[in-house]
Amino acid sequence: MTPTSILERIRRLFAAGPSAHLDSIRDAFANGTLAEPVRPMSDQELARAIREFRSMPVSDWTVAKLSRRLLEASVPRDG
């Protein structure tokens, strides 16, 4: 999954119009501080991560937390 395709999935979860949160995600993909998950997340997993991300002001810390959520989704689950 490319950053462009995951960004498009994320964009569908945001209301129409400009968003500092969405801009921060785009910028983080562009500068390499956010990487797409190895295993595609379900829409439910992605929506949960985005809801959590949007509930806080945009900052380096919130982008890092979102990055951890995307990486956690890449780890195979036991059993």
Image (tube, rainbow, N blue to C red):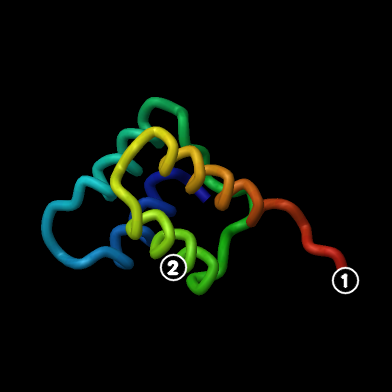
Position in image of residue 21 (x %, y %): 27, 48
Q: Which amino acid does label 1 sit on?
A: Gly
The residue at the point 38 percent across, 61 percent down is 9
Q: Which amino acid does label 2 sit on?
A: Ala
62 relative to 36 in the view: left or right: left
Disc 2 target residue:
47
Quick one: which residue is furthest to the right in this view?
79
Quick one: which residue is furthest to the front in this view?
56
Q: What element carries label 2?
A: helix
Position in image of residue 4 (x %, y %): 38, 46
Q: Residues within 10 Å of mark 1 (few under 14, many from 20)?
A: few
Residue 14, quarter of picture: bottom left
Number of numbered discs visible in the structure rendering: 2
Q: What element carries label 1?
A: loop
23 relative to 73 in the view: left or right: left
Position in image of residue 33 (x %, y %): 46, 30
Q: How crowded is mark 2: few (under 14 residues within 10 Å), some or many (20 or more)?
A: some
The residue at the point 40 percent across, 36 percent down is 29
Is residue 55 or residue 7 the one in the foreground? 55
Position in image of residue 53 (x %, y %): 40, 54
- Quadrant location of the C terminus? bottom right
Quick one: which residue is furthest to the left in this view?
17
Q: Quick check: 58 above or below 18?
A: above
Disc 1 target residue:
79
Earlier in the chain: of badge 1 and badge 2, it is: 2
Q: Quick check: 9 above or below 2?
A: below
Residue 62, quarter of picture: top left
Mark 1 and mark 2: Cα distance apart in space: 23 Å
